[in-house]
Structure formats: structure tokens, C-alpha cells
Amino acid sequence: MVMSKNVIDDSGINEVFIEDNTTRLARKGADIFSGSAKESVFNKGSFVVAVSGGSTPRAMHRMLGEEPFVSEIPWEKTHIFWVDERCVPFSDSASNYGAFKSDLIGRAPIPSYHIHPMPAEDVPSDGALRYEEELLSFFQLKEGQFPVFDLLMLGIGKDGHTASLFPGSRALEEKKRLVVPVKGGNPYVYRLTLTLPVLKMARRVVFLVSGKGKAGTVEAILERKDENLPAGRVRPSDGRLIWLLDREAASLLHRR
Ligand code: 6PG
């Protein structure tokens, strides 16, 4: 049984791993998260990651709270930020932070002041400014500079969105802001999202994609290079771009 295949696509930009099932997909994601954490801490003394919401990454988040990951990851040097958040109370089932909290926080020794949820309960425009301030301060940035995350864990929607950057959204054209408020998605609510310039600066970007429903979108991005789809526009400036797919999500790819 094939466990994992690494397929470098013809562009050489995307590193694609195809896993047999969702459990192996979650395991591969946890392996990359753990490896990135150890490498970042070895190289620079800290690991700064931004995670996404939705359902796909939850099994991976739960796995990070179990052996071997819960013991091997340098949590005391790890900072967790969010790629996007729905503007709902953390107790709401739609809250990305709320889901992450129930899946991992309390099961791994992450210092509470190393967890940086987006201010989802503020007025969205204020929340975006507050999170922008938090990023500028944490990364010690001047105006016009962008934060460089060690790792971004992204998902994609069937419509090709990633983070809360939806097809046709003005947010996709944002060149200066780090965080913007948008309205969209399912649930159709206000959200806060990192902008494309921030996503492109990361040292390592991982798309975690599962299910037949996304096979067409994956094929459009990886084989037809469709940049009308927001996820297809996440091209790290000089970081690594890794796609972790299960067999269903990869089912329309020709080279596998
Ligand atoms: C969000 C996510 C979003 C997610 C995709 C895929 O807040 O909705 O950050 O970008 O990654 O919508 O969601 P699923 O994993 O639930 O398919």
C-alpha cells in the first residue's frame, strides 16, 4: 500500500505529497509541523506558525497533542497565530480558535502568552487593526514591512479560497495591510484574514487538502495553474510550498 508519494510537479514550485487516507494525511501534516518547529528553533530559537480553521486540520491538531508530537515539539519556544478567524464568540462552533482550543490547547504545554488568537469579538475593522498591531509588535516591524512566519498551515475551499480570501474579493488586491476584515464563506459571516503579501512571505507554506470535493480545485491549481483561484496565488517569495493531499483530493491529478 502506498503510504506517501512525493511528486514534484513540472513547475518545480509545488512539492506534492499524496497520502492514502485522512489519518495518514493528518500524520504527514503533524510530521511537517514538528520538523518545522525543531528546525526553526535550532536555526533561530523560536517557531512562529499561523494555523487555519475549517474541518480538515482538526485531526492533525489533535494528533499534535499526542505522542510522539506532544513530547518532541519545542512548545515553550512556539508561538501560534491564526491565518483567519470568523468574527464570532470563541465559544461558537464556527470559531477557529474555539476548535483549536478544544483540539490542542490544554493537551500540549504551550505557554498561554504564546497563543495569539485574532480579536474576533471586536468590530471587524477594529479587530483587523488590533491584530495588525500585534503582528507589527511581535515581529518588530516598521510600517511597510511584512511578518515572516516559519510555517503557514492553509486549507482550500471548493471555490479555491484560502484563509478568508474568497474569489473576486477586493481583499485579494490588498498590497499594504497585513490583516483585513471581509464578509464571506460558509458560514457567511465577517472574518479577519491575513493578506496575500503576508502569506507569500512565509518560509514554508503547507496546504492540507482532503476529499473528492476538492479534487477539481486541486487539479485547477496544480495542473492548470489557475491563478483566478485565491489559493493558486499563494506563491511564497522564496519559501517552500508543500501540498499535502489525500488520494481523493489528488484523484484528478495526472502525474501521481
Ligand atoms: C476558514 C479556513 C478556511 C478553510 C477552508 C477549508 O476559516 O474557513 O481558514 O480557509 O481552510 O475553508 O475548510 P475545510 O477544511 O472545512 O474544508
Image (cartoon, rainbow, N blue to C red):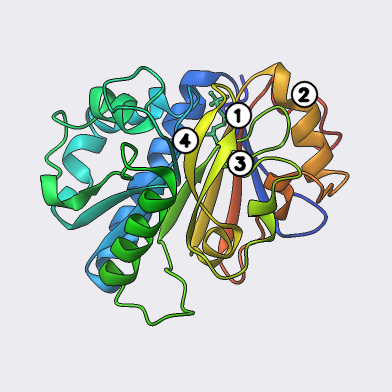
Q: Mark 1 near ligand 1 (CB under 8 Å)?
A: yes
Amino acid type at image mark 2 = Ser
Task: From the viewer's side, name the closer residue of 211 and 50.
Answer: 50
Q: Which residue is drawn at 38% across and 59% down?
A: 129
Give the Cα separation between the discs numbered 3 and 4.
20 Å
According to the picture, the residue beneath numbered tag 3 turns out to be: 162
Above or below — where is 4 with respect to 223? Answer: above
SS of the residue at dot 4?
helix
- The spot of residue 56 in percent (x, y) is 50, 25
> Whole-Å distance between the Cαs marked 2 and 4?
18 Å
Image-based side of 226 in relation to 59, left or right: right
Q: Which amino acid does label 1 sit on?
A: Gly
Residue 187 % position (x, y): 54, 21
Residue 2: image location, x then y, percent: 62, 25
Q: Distance between the residues labelled 3 and 1?
A: 10 Å
| First along the sequence among labels 3 and 2 | 3
* Local crowd size for mark 3, using a 10 Å CA cut-off: few (<14), some (14–19), many (≥20): many
- Label whose residue precedes the other's in the sequence (2 or 4): 4
